[in-house]
Image (tube, helix red, strand yellow):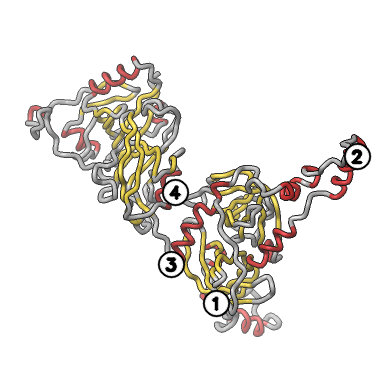
Amino acid sequence: MLRKNGQAVKSAAAIGLLFGASAVSVLPPGNSVAHAEEAAQHSTQRGPESVADLAESLIDAVVNIAITQTSKTDADGGFPSPNFPEDAPFQDLFDDYFKNPDANKAPRKVSSLGSGFVIDPAGYIVTNNHVIEGATEIEVNFADGSKLDAKLVGTDTKTDLALLKVEPKKPLKAVAFGDSRKMRIGDWVMAIGNPFGLGGSVSVGIISARNRNINAGPYDNFIQTDAAINRGNSGGPLFNMFGEVIGINTAIISPTGGSIGIGFAVPTEIATTVVSQLREFGETRRGWLGVRIQPVTEDIFADLKLDRPRGALISGIITGGPVDNGSMEIGDVVLQFNGENINEMRDLPRIVAESPIDKPLKAVLLRKGKEITIDVTLKRQPEEEKDKPAATSDDPSAKPPVVENAPETGKDGTETDPGPDEQALPPQPSDLLGLTLETLTAENRKAFGIPETVEGVLVADVPVGSPAQEKGIVKGDVIVEIAQDFVESPDDVADKIAELKSADRRNAYLMLADKTGALRLVAIPLD
């Protein structure tokens, strides 16, 4: 059950601090075996070196967040009344307590709800959004026992971060952000926070994994750690061994509610940009590319002429978006954006969101087997809408694109208008790729509800249990391209399949349009 909730050391002494004195023990003069055994026994008895100095230097900057919320009983005027029989003893007293509309109206104080940390001596404090969500009052409790009321500066639900401001009488102890990108699996980290309301608790562990996607939000890129993180640690800092914050503790996986050594922290490579924008604007201002994307799978990477599955495949262009100017095309693969590699599809939305808006940026694309570099100027991400599309987008709120093709034209470029005889001709079905295919006509367009803006080859039937059905292809879909080449008849499909088989391709890479014109890309086995 999911519950929200470094690097190489500086010196040999620090190495001893992490790994125990035996790691840095120096053999006494003479280098005798007896002396070596004595030194080893002595260091084992003493145990690992203390991390007290590091913890002491940081603990004053970590705070306890308590909030006040309006009691849920306000809406119904009191707690539900138990069902007592008529004329039961003391019934009038129970009625006064349970049915009095003014009873239990006082706000409910929730203490020791979460953690936070000071990032500026002037009083700016970072915590999780879920720690302060719904609060009418926020109180910050410091390690020395002092308390201050806090004002909410801004929140970001997509990364579960919030920024608070208190007004201290003197500068506060603050900690600095470090660079989480430099952290490696196995680096030592320290968590400080408020587990179960026990303020100022310190735990030490290592980074167990990086770039974890736990489906908590659209920009998941968590640090996983085995440092003990429990309820109440939410919003607290995860430090490297230099005393820098490299993560904000946010979630745990636990069947019991307690730590089982699987905790997650928002890395500072994401948090620093969010916190900076919250501080400057009171809100986030993320970049938006205006595309729909899907992963580059094992089935199609060879058809795209990639060395391995990587990048984000463009399956749609949002009308009116930043790249609705021809700079990006459906079928392009984004390999790099703003200097960062796109190793998998989910990297692109995160990198785009973190990139500056209204400023020219470089994007490296793979188009028809060749790498090209283009300039892209991002817009600010639109507000989220209630109805989200099923396909992945660089903005989860983006609507499915509309395919806007030119009027039907002949090969000489002139517009065509099929006459009555042509319209009356029945479609000639062909069995290819395990599909029954037909040339698009006025009749089958009407039968399947396919708009005139969609061009290609109609899928008239899909056998039950076929590979095509498993890939989600249905009757009424239209094959627009195969291996990035446009097709307009079953013969075109047959020719392209023969070409792919002669090149020893295992899959046919199809671009399909549904009845609304929304595009997607699939790979069908050629065997």
Q: Describe the element under mark 3 as helix, strand or loop.
A: loop
Numbered badge on residue 167: 1
Point out the tag, 2 or 1, that comes first from the N-terminus. 2
Give the mark nearest the N terminus, 4 or 1: 1
The Cα atoms of the two marked residues, 2 and 1, are separated by: 59 Å
Residue contact between numbered discs 2 and 1, judged by CB atoms under 8 Å: no
Sequence-wise, which precedes: disc 2 or disc 3?
2
Observer-side mark, 2 or 3, equals 2
Q: Which badge, 4 or 2, comes first in the chain's sequence?
A: 2
Asked if marks 1 and 3 touch (Cβ < 8 Å), the reply is no
Classify mark 4: helix, strand or loop. helix
Please state which of the two labelled residues, at mark 1 or mark 3, is closer to the viewer.
Answer: 1
Is 482 left or right of 239, judged from the image as shown?
Answer: left
Q: Earlier in the sequence, mark 3 or mark 4?
A: 3
What secondary structure is marked by label 1? loop
Q: Residues within 10 Å of mark 2 (few under 14, many from 20)?
A: some
Q: Which residue is mark 3?
A: 282
Q: In this figure, which residue is indicated by the disc labeled 2? A: 35
Q: Residue tagged by mark 4?
A: 350
In the image, taking residue 9 as reference, residue 334 lies left or right, namely: left
